[in-house]
Amino acid sequence: MSNSETSSKPRVYVSVIFCDRIIREHATDLLTGVRITDGYVLNPVGIVPPKADGSPDEEHPLFIALPVKFTAIIRFCSEEAVTFTWTLKGTRPNGEPLSRGPAALVPVQIGAGPDGLTVSSNISISSAEPGDYWFEVYVDGVVATKAPIRIKLGTPIGPLEPLQPMEFPDPDTPLKPA
């Protein structure tokens, strides 16, 4: 953004919080963040894979982590009415982007003061890579704010016992009363 654009356009203030989920009352447009957080602990689950012969390979369990799913609540406000575009970009702890494609530019118009805009964005991180994941909110192509969420690896669960095949009664055999 050039200096002439910056000085002629009202500044947009941005804040971000993360939570497990939201409740939105559409009639009143009220939004509630449930379990506001700045991090999660992943407990990988151990699974006993089968060997080539179909028997359980209990000596080599596989550990998997379920995706971390949460919501970003993003608030935009300005001292004057303003039109702008915004986007959200995430970065992994190793510096790589969370998303492979280009981030969508979202055009918005907000009023002055409390007549801003609050949006929510569902996020899913399908990696067990521990560390700080940074999320940047851009306004008209410029970083307006950044917020981290920390993923820690906890104690693995398992390994879980291998599934046993279920035995079903012969359909031709009558059931005995209990």
Image (cartoon, helix red, strand yellow):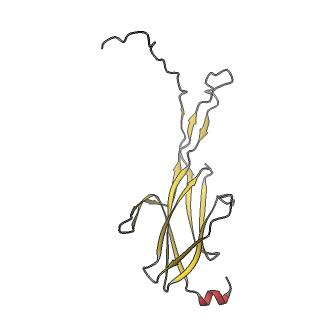
Residue that sits furthest to the front in the current view: 172
Out of 121 and 106, give the one closest to the viewer: 106
Q: Quadrant of the N terminus?
A: bottom right
Q: Quadrant of residue 7?
A: bottom right
Image spot of residue 25 (x, y percent): 37, 64
> Residue at left 43%, top 79%?
115
Q: Is residue 69 left or right of residue 59?
A: left
Q: Residue at x 60, y 60 (%)?
A: 133
In the image, residue 108 lies at what x, y percent?
A: 54, 75
- Residue 177 sits in which quadrant? top left
- Percent from the top left, x then y, of residue 64? 59, 41
Q: Is residue 112 above or below residue 161?
A: below
Q: Is residue 45 above or below residue 178?
A: below
Q: Along the line of sight, which residue is nearer the eye, 31 or 135?
A: 31
Location of residue 125 in the rendering, given as x and y in whole percent from the top left corner = 58, 53
Of residues 140 and 94, the one nearer the viewer is: 140
Q: How many marks?
A: 0
Residue 169 against residue 17 in the figure, above or below: above
State whether residue 13 is above or below residue 73: below
Q: Residue furthest top?
A: 173
The residue depicted at 48 percent of the width and 17 percent of the height is 167
Residue positioned 44% across, 14% down in the render:
169
